[in-house]
Image (tube, grey):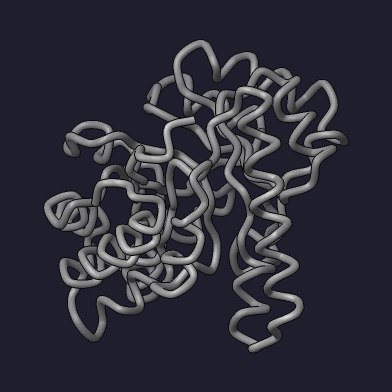
Amino acid sequence: MDNRKPIRLGVNIDHVATVRNARGGYHPDPIRAARAAIAAGAHGITAHLREDRRHIIDIDVERLMRDIEAPLNLEMAATEEMVGIAGGLRPHAVCLVPEKREERTTEGGLDVIGGGKALQSAVDVLSRHSRVSLFIAADPAQIEAAAKSGAAVIELHTGTWCEAVSATDEEESLAELRRLAEGARYAVSLGLEVHAGHGLDYGTAELISALPEIAELNIGHYLVGEAVFCGLDAAVKNMLAAMARGRARLGAPA
């Protein structure tokens, strides 16, 4: 593969909507955040429309499709309701994720092997109009099942690795990074495009950007948190700079 290929940043705006919904009303507006992220250099926008609508709501997705001139990656569970919504909107990409009402955010990867006919049906239907991605752990069996499903992309769950880095557990963090690297290589060998996300900050984004197989990072919570202190424009630019430093280790363009 071409190691010189630059890496893309998708900015997840879910938690701008979380702040809005905590008070009600219209402020802060996640679509305004999406515009700011794109203006700062982000390559696309990610939004997770959960079944319980705890942050992003239907009108947000409709406005993103109508008002944002950038690719939308719609994260969703593989349910009949969500497949129907995506079919009506036809976003650039759909990322299927596991979802539990009691969790604060999406934890762990999708079980593609155990997903059965329902998951396969969702992939088949969504692939007619959108690029389908599966959010999974860097497990060879899950990666192989993702490739067999016909999905074009996998997004590797980086949360376990990021937690080990935060805990300064060097042995565990190195083992998890090695697992991600091996998983990314295996996925590419099966013809999949590889994205990564969950728990990434400037430091971990820089490190994982040095893996040539990673084509895109999707980052939200950390950027929204940093925006409180430096503004979303600066946070996105700082993240892009971190990713460029990681890619530069391969001699790739910024």
Residue at the location (36% across, 46% down)?
7
Residue at the location (32% across, 63% down)?
245
Vertical relation: 138 (above or below) 244: above
The answer to whether one can see residue 204 in this image is: yes
Q: Position of residue 199 (x, y in %)?
A: 54, 68
Q: Position of residue 141 (x, y in %)?
A: 84, 37
Vertical relation: 50 (above or below) 229: above
Residue at the location (45% across, 15% down)?
129
On screen, residue 11 versus residue 188, left or right, reads left
Instruction: Count the marks.
Output: 0
Q: Position of residue 236 (x, y in %)?
A: 25, 64
Of residues 118 and 177, the one drawn nearer to the viewer in this rendering: 177
Instruction: Spot the residue most to the left.
Output: 39
On screen, residue 37 versus residue 170, left or right, reads left
The answer to whether one can see residue 60 in this image is: no
Q: Position of residue 170 (x, y in %)?
A: 69, 83
Of residues 86 and 182, the one drawn nearer to the viewer in this rendering: 182
Vertical relation: 181 (above or below) 63: below
Residue at the location (34% across, 50% down)?
251
